[in-house]
Image: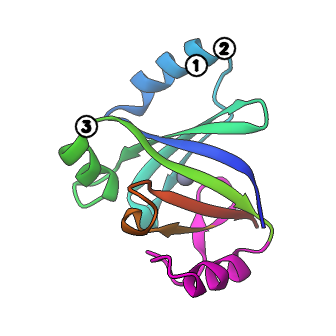
Amino acid sequence: MFRKIEHLGIAVENIEKSLAVYESLIGETSYKTEIVETEFVKTAFIRVGESKIELLEATDSTSPIAKFLEKKGKGFHHVAFEVDDIEQEILRLQKLGFELIHQSPKSGADNKLIAFLHPKSTEGLLVEICQEK
Ligand code: ZN
C-alpha cells in the first residue's frame, strides 16, 4: 500500500549552494547529508511537515544525476512514495505491467530500501518507492 509522498527529489549541480537556497525557502535546516556510493550521489534532506525535499548532486560523471543534469538541467527529478512492504509492491506493480528499474529492493539514502520505476511506464514521471529499514 502507498502511504504518502515521502519526499521529492531535486537534481542540483552544487549541494552546498542549493541547500542554502532551499533552507531559506523552507525555513528549516537540513537534518542529514549523505553519500550513496552505489548510486554515485551526494544527498541532503530537509523536512517539510510530513514530507521531505531530497537534493541530489552527482559524485561522478557516470552518476544517473550527472546524466540527468546534462539532458534536462537542474530541477525536479523524482517523487518517492512510502510503502508498507516494498517487496510486495514490486510484485504488485510488475503484475500490473509497470517497468521497474530495480527488480528487488536496494539500499538507498536516509535508511531506506528503495526501488525505481521507469518513467516510460508512469507517464514520464520518475517514481521511487521506499520503505523504512
Ligand atoms: Zn529519492
Place of residue 79 in the rendered image (x, y in percent of width and height, measured from the top left):
55, 49
Which is more toward the observer, 22 or 81?
81
Q: Kindly identify the residue that appears in the image at 58 percent across and 19 percent down.
A: 23
Q: In the rendered image, which residue does mark 1 sit on?
A: 23
Amino acid type of disc 2? Gly
The reply, left or right, for residue 2 in relation to residue 94 is right
Place of residue 33 in the rendered image (x, y in percent of width and height, measured from the top left):
57, 41
Amino acid type of disc 3? Gly
Instruction: Note whether ligand 1 is within 8 Å of mark 1.
Output: no
Q: Quadrant of residue 126?
A: bottom left
Q: In the rendered image, which residue does mark 2 sit on?
A: 27
Amino acid type of disc 1? Glu
Image quarter hosting the N terminus: bottom right
The reply, left or right, for residue 87 in relation to residue 66 is right
Place of residue 35 in the rendered image (x, y in percent of width and height, measured from the top left):
49, 52
Asked if disc 2 and disc 1 are in contact, CB closer than 8 Å, the reply is yes
Q: State the SS at label 1.
A: helix
Nearer the observer: mark 1 or 3; the answer is 3
Q: Quadrant of residue 125?
A: bottom left
Image quarter hosting the C terminus: bottom right
Per the model, the C-alpha gap separating discs 2 and 1 is 6 Å
Place of residue 117 in the rendered image (x, y in percent of width and height, measured from the top left):
48, 68
Per the model, the C-alpha gap separating discs 3 and 2 is 25 Å
* N-term-proximal mark, 3 vs 2: 2
Nearer the observer: mark 3 or 2; the answer is 3
The magenta stretch is 85-113
Instruction: Note whether ligand 1 is within 8 Å of mark 2.
Output: no
